[in-house]
Amino acid sequence: MEQTKINVLLPALEPFVQESLRKKKSSTTKHLWMRKWNSPRNLSKKLWMRMVTMWKSRKSKACPILILAAPTGAGKTSLVTELDPTRFEILSFDSRQIYKNMSIGTAAPTKEEQSKIAHHLVEVLSPSEAVDAGLYNRLAEEALQKVLNLDKIPVFTAGTGFYLKAFLFGMFPVPEIDVSVRDRVLSMSKEEKKNLLKELDPNALDKIFPEDDYRLGRALEVNLMGEKWSRLKIDPSTSAICRYDLDIRLGVFLDLDRKELYEKINLRAKQMIEKGMVDEAWKIRERFGETCPGLKSLGYNFALENKKGNSNLETFLADLSRSHRNYAKRQVTWFRKETYVQPMGRSEALERIKHMK
């Protein structure tokens, strides 16, 4: 029984042991882990120390991985193109860049950039296909196996932190959702979803970003199926760290000054329009319909409104820039609270990666 408990809980221990050892405050490790993972609180000191010892032993034999997280527009792609392609390959965790034929509005890596270092999970789905954490996990697992078979180090680039965390550390055991429940939730406005979720599961709203309509809908679906979304606990046995024996040798969060980041975002929004984002959006609409999942990606609604004549170029640029800045702000909030990445600048990140073993 004790060994079974260790095998299940060990992967969840990963980020908190790393954080505490890095800060040399190992006495706080157990507290951090239990608080963040809602784990059983009756672990004996002997069992806990055995888990830590096993983690340290496993670390020396595990496959190294690198995490590079950053908000939109911060320069992840330009940084990874400077990495050694004989050592590294990229696994992209971006819920928008995974779509085909949308490279302008999603700022996906260009063919030239992808020729410098191999990228996976970029432009692989049709805009007609919906993506969620489960599908992303399956695609990421296939890509990870390819990289590991080449004996290269996987670099997880993350804009969508939720998908990355679900893949590495495990997923919530969400029940299968009935079609009738899903259709009901889809027909509701954001305000209606919030009000009903507040009634069914008040604690759930505390864990969801105010503008995260997708997560709001998923939480409501789970509650309508009879389970409390706020009480779901991550199943660490679904963790890629556990299944593939991975070790986060370096976790980077590209931390830019807000003014610098917003200037980059404003410039990129202008470049998106100049490169033809409006025509790109319209072609997707004509082929897959205006309600296709791909067109729910950030900014495409403004491109369609411009094409329809409902906004001028100045308004389109302002709306597009603002939506990207707001999204970047939410990404920064997410990654700054994660323990598996450390904030640092571009130069420091490149230097640390260069000396990574």
Image (cartoon, rainbow, N blue to C red):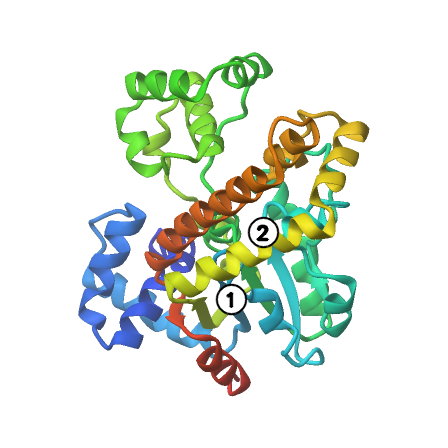
- Please name the amino acid that badge 2 sits on: Ala
For mark 2, what is the residue? Answer: 269
* Mark 1 secondary-structure assignment: strand
Q: Where does the image place residue 173, in percent across and percent down from the top left?
A: 46, 36
Identity of the residue drawn at 45% across and 69% down: 251
Q: CA distance from mark 2 to mark 1?
A: 23 Å
Closer to us: 20 or 62: 20
* Mark 2 secondary-structure assignment: helix
Above or below residue 8? Residue 300 is: above
For mark 1, what is the residue? Answer: 68
Closer to us: 249 or 325: 325
Closer to us: 59 or 314: 314
Label 2 vs 1, first from the N-terminus:
1
User: Can you tell which mark lies on residue 56?
Assistant: none
* Residue 97 visible to an observer of this rendering: no
Q: Where does the image place residue 30, in percent across and percent down from the top left?
A: 23, 61
Identity of the residue drawn at 66% across and 73% down: 81
